[in-house]
Structures are given as structure tokens and as C-alpha cells.
Amino acid sequence: MRQISRMFNTILLFWTFAVVAHSQTSAPAAITITRGGVLLKGKLYISEGEGKFPTVILLHGLPGNEIDVLGLGAKLSEAGINVVTFNYSGTYKSQGQNNFENTQKDIQAAFQFVHQPENISKYKVDTTRIYLGGWSYGGGMALTYTANHPEISDVFSIAGTDHGEFFREYRRNPGFKQMIDTMFEQLAAPSGPVRFPKGEMPKDVTEQMIADGDSTIDLRKSAPLLAQKNILLVGAWDDVMVTMDHHILPLYRTLKKYQAQNVKIVTFQDNHAFTQSRAGLVRTIINWIEAITLEK
């Protein structure tokens, strides 16, 4: 239980860290993404210069924050890559409620946003070079979306949660279950920044999620759908939340089992928030995008 307590304190530290706004070299543009009648609040880090730019749709962890994802938006835009971030449905000032299904719809709305003619012109978007990526919860959701959308070919996941493994650990480990239940209670509105639908906390949906063998939130089961994609998996050896042993390496090995030719794994000696490796993380993403551009 002492180890579980340390993990819980670490999670709270990362949550606090994620919510704190980082100083930016230039202010991002405030944007509103429309998903049906639901308005999602976000930021767009705009590259400067002539011509059109590759654009990354970059997904937060949960709950995320109202600024940036690990400071990547600001740094990638300095390198000539636009970055779109947004708060998921039911978090912070975005409307609606938060669950897996709505997150997937949110991602689709973000793709529609960057393909709108007025936004292509305003933000100089190169629609032939749009990439999806995310951190933690967002990494898992990016891979899930990619598995379900054949038109998406390029995705990166930074310490991305395999939610199939998450729910298996929740069921088999009482200490982990207690920690997650406490964390979600603290995240939940009105005291926290997330509005969960009634009856959709982990304690309510775990058995259904595990029983749903076709559910693509279980990334290892999605491997046949992902094997033909360009995938970058980034992990941290000292990550106690999304561990290399339970999340990153099993997914990588399963993708290779299904003959994935374009999956790359990069690791850092760091924690879940990559606090010591931000420069290396930025360079890794830039190199991956440049390699894909050269191949095409």
C-alpha cells in the first residue's frame, strides 16, 4: 500500500503540473471547435513564415489544462509546425460531458476544423501533412481514433495509456482500484474540472470494457488495424503511471507481431511528464515528421 500511496501522490503531482500554465514565447490563438452543438475551447500555436505548414492535432492528458501539452505546442510551432490543442468535452470551459465516446467525436471535430477552408487559409494549413498525437490519456485516444479511421495514416503517442490494460489492472489490483477511484472523485465536477456522465466512472464501466472484445480502447486488440500506420511510440523508463512493461512495450511487440513496418519506439530515462527530456521529446517528434515527409 505504501507503493500505491506514492503512485497516487505522483499522479496528483503530475495533474498539478499539467494544469500550471507555462510561459510561452508567443501567445497562441484562442479557437473554438464546434462538435455538433457542443463548443470546445482550444488553442492554436501558429507557425510564422511563408507557405503552408504541417499541422499537429495534439491531445491533452486527463484533465489536461487550458494552455499547452507539455510545452510542445509552443516549441513545435517555433520549428514550423502548427499545433492545435483543445479541451475535451466536459473539461474546463468546453461544453458537454467527458467519456471515451465523446473524446473520439471531439477528435473528429478537430480534424474538420483544420480542413475548413477559412482555417486552411487563416492558419496556412498544409492539409497533406496533418498529424495526430497525444500524451497520456490523449496518446491512447489518438491511437484509438487512428485504429477506427483508415484515412488517418500518421500518429504518435507519448506515454499513451492502453485503456484495455488500464481496466485489467483496475480489476485485478485492489490498491490500484482504490487509487483510481479516489483520483476520479477529485477530478469530477463540481470540485474538479471534469464533468463525467452519471454511471461512467471506472467503477461503473470496467466489467463492460473488459468484456467488449472488439473495443479499440484495448490497443493490443487494435494492433491489426494499426499495423499499417506510421506510428511513433514514446515511453519513459521511470513512468509509474503508464509503464513501459504494461503499456508501451506490449503494444510495440503486438504491433510487430502483426508485421508493422513503420512503428518506431523511442524511450527516455524520465518520468510521466518528461520533465528532464522536453528538448529531446520535441526533437523526436520533429524528426519523425520530417522522416514521413521525405518518404512521401
Image: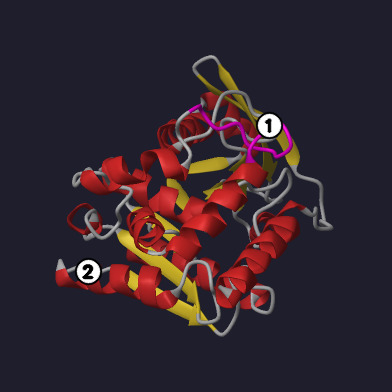
Furthest toward the top, the residue is: 37
Q: Residue reaching furthest bottom?
A: 269
User: Residue 77 appears at what percent x and percent y?
Assistant: 67, 55
Q: Quadrant of residue 286?
A: bottom right
Q: Nearer the viewer, mark 1 or mark 2?
A: 2
Q: Give me the residue at 64% from left, 48% from top.
A: 64
Q: On screen, 25 above or below 284?
A: above
On the rendered image, what quadrant is the N terminus found in? bottom right
| 82 within the magenta span | no
Residue at the spot of label 1: 31
Highlighted range, magenta: 188-198
Identify the residue shown where x is 44% and y is 59%: 161
Residue contact between numbered discs 1 and 2, judged by CB atoms under 8 Å: no
| Disc 1 element | strand
Q: Which residue was labeled with disc 2?
A: 254
Residue closest to the eye, 46 or 230: 230
Q: Is residue 293 left or right of residue 48?
A: left
Q: Amino acid at mark 1?
A: Ile
Provide residue 212's location: percent of width, then percent of height: 22, 43
Q: Position of residue 237 (x, y in %)?
A: 50, 82
Instruction: Indicate the amino acid at tag 2.
Output: Thr
Taking the spot 45% from the left edge, 30% from the top edge, the residue there is 199
